[in-house]
Image (cartoon, rainbow, N blue to C red):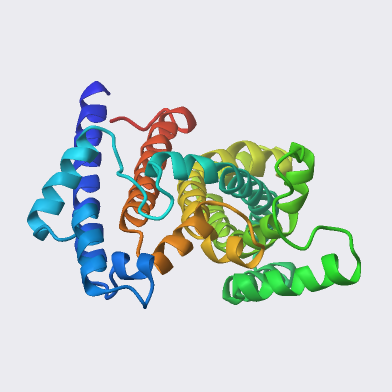
């Protein structure tokens, strides 16, 4: 077990190094100069050159890359060009809306997908199963921004049940802020429930064909006990995998939804940074998201031991 963890940690370091290199190279290939954006179109070339020198953008790319890697090794993601504050602090200031949005979306997606996917597998080939497959295909193909605008028009503009956008004022309570997240969480939950539903259905169908399920039924056990105790428990490994991947996708895929609903989360921060060519913020956000992906995969792999004692590393 310890050897497995050490190997995974070394692999995580290698993956993060590759991600850091790719992010650095891609951002430098994008047209646009942060100094020119900051100073505006009326700035002189001398002023732009002076600001580039101050920000270190005039140095050769290998030097910039080496300096950035050295900062990363010390846990420093750099200084935001426009916000004039450490990137970690900027991300921490925007983390709360993204965290609650991801958590609420995952709860909604799981609450829909788990019972629906299991029921669809048990009722395979019936009208219910076909309806579930149709609904999954429809929700997975619906753009999240379109669904968000439709729900906003119905529940916020016409009915007035929920806030249109924003995250509440500076002194708003947690309940008020969470009420602003209901609509975007429903949007992300519905869209991502389709993938989870199909994975759960496929995993359950594989398990329901196994001999031990037939044996349990032959012994006269109630169908509910056969499904919940024997089938679902043995289908949990692929279900955990898709739930972990969905969590990571929700964190990285909330950019559009946060923009539509005007949420001051990490997604809107990244959008602003891209428009301003704020390289440190873009690089730091992408690295943090990649690290979350890797950590979630590690946690899911370790949960396999809890779910299925037959798994050995």
Position of residue 155 measured from the top left corner of the image (x, y, whole percent): 84, 66
Residue placed most toward the observer, 277 or 112: 277
Residue placed most toward the observer, 228 or 155: 155
Q: Residue at x 67, y 55 (%)?
A: 185
Reply above or below: 281 against 306: below
Q: Residue at x 24, y 33 (%)?
A: 9
Tell which residue pokes out farthest to the right in this image. Answer: 159
Position of residue 281 measured from the top left corner of the image (x, y, whole percent): 37, 53
Position of residue 151 measured from the top left corner of the image (x, y, whole percent): 76, 69
Left of 24 or right of it: where is 300?
right
State the image quarter where residue 26 is shown.
bottom left
Reply above or below: 140 against 99: below
Tell which residue pokes out farthest to the top in this image. Answer: 2
Counting every numbered tag in the picture gives 0
Left of 213 or right of it: where is 176?
right
Quadrant the C terminus occupies: top left
Q: Residue at x 36, y 57 (%)?
A: 282
State the image quarter where residue 260 is shown.
bottom right
Residue 216 visible, this angle = yes
Left of 89 or right of it: where is 111?
right
Residue 206 visible, this angle = no
Quadrant the N terminus occupies: top left
Reply above or below: 235 against 62: above
Reply above or below: 210 against 195: above
Residue placed most toward the observer, 51 or 88: 51
Position of residue 289 measured from the top left corner of the image (x, y, whole percent): 40, 49
């Amino acid at each position: 077990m310890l050897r497995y963890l050490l190997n995974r940690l070394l692999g995580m370091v290698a993956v993060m190094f590759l991600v850091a290199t790719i992010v650095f190279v891609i951002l430098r290939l994008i047209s646009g100069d942060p100094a020119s954006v900051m100073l505006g179109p009326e700035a002189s070339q001398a002023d732009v050159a002076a600001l580039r020198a101050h920000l270190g953008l005039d140095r050769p790319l290998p030097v910039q890359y080496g300096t950035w890697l050295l900062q990363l090794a010390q846990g420093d993601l750099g200084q935001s060009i426009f916000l004039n504050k450490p990137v970690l602090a900027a991300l921490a200031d925007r983390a709360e809306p993204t965290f609650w949005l991801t958590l609420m979306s995952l709860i909604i997606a799981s609450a829909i997908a788990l019972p629906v996917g299991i029921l669809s597998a048990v009722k395979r080939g019936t009208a219910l199963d076909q309806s579930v497959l149709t609904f999954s295909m429809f929700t997975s193909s619906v753009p999240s921004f379109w669904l968000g605008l439709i729900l906003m028009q119905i529940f916020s503009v016409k009915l007035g049940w929920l806030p249109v956008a924003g995250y509440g004022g500076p002194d708003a309570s947690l309940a008020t802020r969470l009420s602003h997240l209901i609509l975007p969480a429903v949007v992300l939950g519905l869209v991502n429930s389709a993938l989870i539903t199909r994975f759960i259905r496929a995993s359950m169908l594989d398990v329901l064909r196994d001999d031990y399920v037939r044996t349990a039924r032959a012994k006269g056990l109630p169908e509910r006990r056969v499904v919940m105790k024997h089938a679902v428990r043995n289908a949990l490994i692929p279900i955990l995998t898709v739930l972990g991947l969905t969590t990571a996708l929700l964190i990285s895929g909330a950019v559009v939804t946060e923009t539509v609903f005007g949420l001051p989360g990490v997604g809107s921060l990244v959008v602003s940074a891209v428009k301003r060519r704020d390289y440190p913020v873009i690089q730091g956000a992408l690295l943090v998201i990649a690290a979350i992906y890797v950590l979630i995969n590690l946690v899911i792999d370790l949960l396999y031991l809890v779910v299925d004692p037959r798994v050995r590393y």
